[in-house]
């Protein structure tokens, strides 16, 4: 093709609505789930093996929390601090999703069906202040864990009350636990009771005891020595 025939920049339609919209989608990664683009053989993070059962891991205390007395306290750097009871929690938008679990002890369990309230829907309610950069999660058994706000706000992070169509069992954190699928499972607090929004980071139970502060399984962020 002669140079003269090549389409020249100035001849291309410039600001058609479709072009600018598509450019915006590309910038925002629209329609990317982060999963469709990952080949099936890369679904298992490094150093992990698949299990079919669902192991139970905790500090050995499995609190019994009837929904009648259940409360979720959200406080700290938010415009609208709230204390939700069970009915108020169920009145928030409900979402179902299927995600994988990756535990730092090297087991991975595929395709867990959750139902609950997306963290994003909770954030719409409480509205973190601009200075908020981290959250600390406090559980009824005394467990704590910390997350960057952007990890807590991941599109698939969910406050789950059901698993595979049935109420979440007590041993797995029922009546409600957090699930943050893109991080090792210790970040997913069972029996979640309080969420604090803060400006500077504060390490949780395992993060203070040698576990990585961030916990990305794809980067094998297992231990704090690798931070
Ligand atoms: N409240 C609470 N949440 C917790 C824990 C805990 O001890 N207490 N353990 C964490 C760890 S280390 C893991 S691997 C997962 C285990 O969840 P499971 O017992 O449902 O598999 O819960 C996480 N959340
Ligand atoms: Mo764990």
Image (cartoon, rainbow, N blue to C red):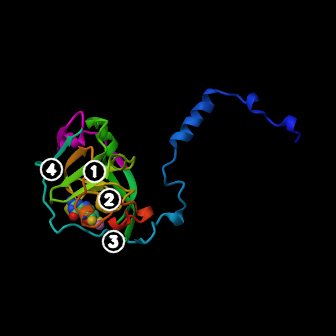
Q: Earlier in the sequence, mark 4 or mark 1?
A: 4
Q: Quadrant of the N terminus?
A: top right
Q: Earlier in the sequence, mark 2 or mark 1?
A: 1
Q: Nearer the viewer, residue 163 or 176?
A: 176
- CA neighbours of label 1 inside 10 A, class few (<14), some (14 to 19), many (20+): some
Q: Residue at x 24, y 33 (%)?
A: 79
Residue 221 at x, y percent in the picture: 38, 64
Residue 214 at x, y percent in the picture: 35, 57
For the image, the number of numbered tags is: 4
The answer for how far apart the CA atoms under marks 2 and 4 are is 32 Å
User: What residue is disc 1 on?
Assistant: 201
Determine whether 145 is above or below 24 in the image: below
Rendered image: mark on residue 127:
none
Rendered image: mark on residue 105:
3
Secondary element under disc 1, as helix, strand or loop, is loop
Q: Is residue 152 left or right of residue 6?
A: left
The answer for how far apart the CA atoms under marks 4 and 1 are is 31 Å
User: What residue is disc 4 on?
Assistant: 67
User: What residue is disc 2 on?
Assistant: 213
Q: Is mark 3 within 8 Å of ligand 2?
A: yes
Foreground mark, 3 or 1, reads 1
């Amino acid at each position: 093709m002669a140079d003269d025939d090549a389409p020249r920049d100035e001849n291309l339609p410039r600001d058609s609505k479709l072009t600018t919209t598509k450019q915006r989608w590309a910038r925002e990664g629209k329609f990317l789930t982060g999963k469709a683009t990952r080949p099936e053989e890369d679904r298992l993070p490094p150093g992990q093996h698949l299990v079919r059962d669902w192991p139970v891991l905790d500090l050995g205390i499995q609190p019994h929390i009837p929904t009648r007395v259940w409360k979720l306290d959200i406080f700290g750097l938010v415009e609208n601090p709230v204390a939700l009871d069970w009915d108020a929690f169920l009145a928030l938008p409900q979402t179902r999703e299927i995600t994988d679990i990756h535990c730092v002890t090297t087991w991975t369990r595929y395709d867990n069906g959750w139902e609950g309230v997306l963290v994003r829907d909770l954030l719409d309610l409480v509205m973190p202040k601009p200075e908020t950069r981290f959250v600390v999660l406090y559980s009824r058994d005394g467990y704590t864990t910390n997350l960057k706000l952007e990890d807590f706000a991941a599109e698939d992070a969910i406050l789950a009350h059901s698993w595979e169509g049935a109420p979440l069992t007590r041993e797995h954190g029922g009546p409600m636990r957090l699930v943050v699928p893109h991080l090792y499972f210790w970040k997913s607090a069972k029996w979640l009771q309080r969420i604090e929004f803060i400006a500077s980071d504060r390490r949780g139970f395992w993060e203070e005891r040698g576990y990585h502060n961030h916990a990305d399984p794809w980067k094998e962020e297992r231990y704090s020595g690798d931070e």
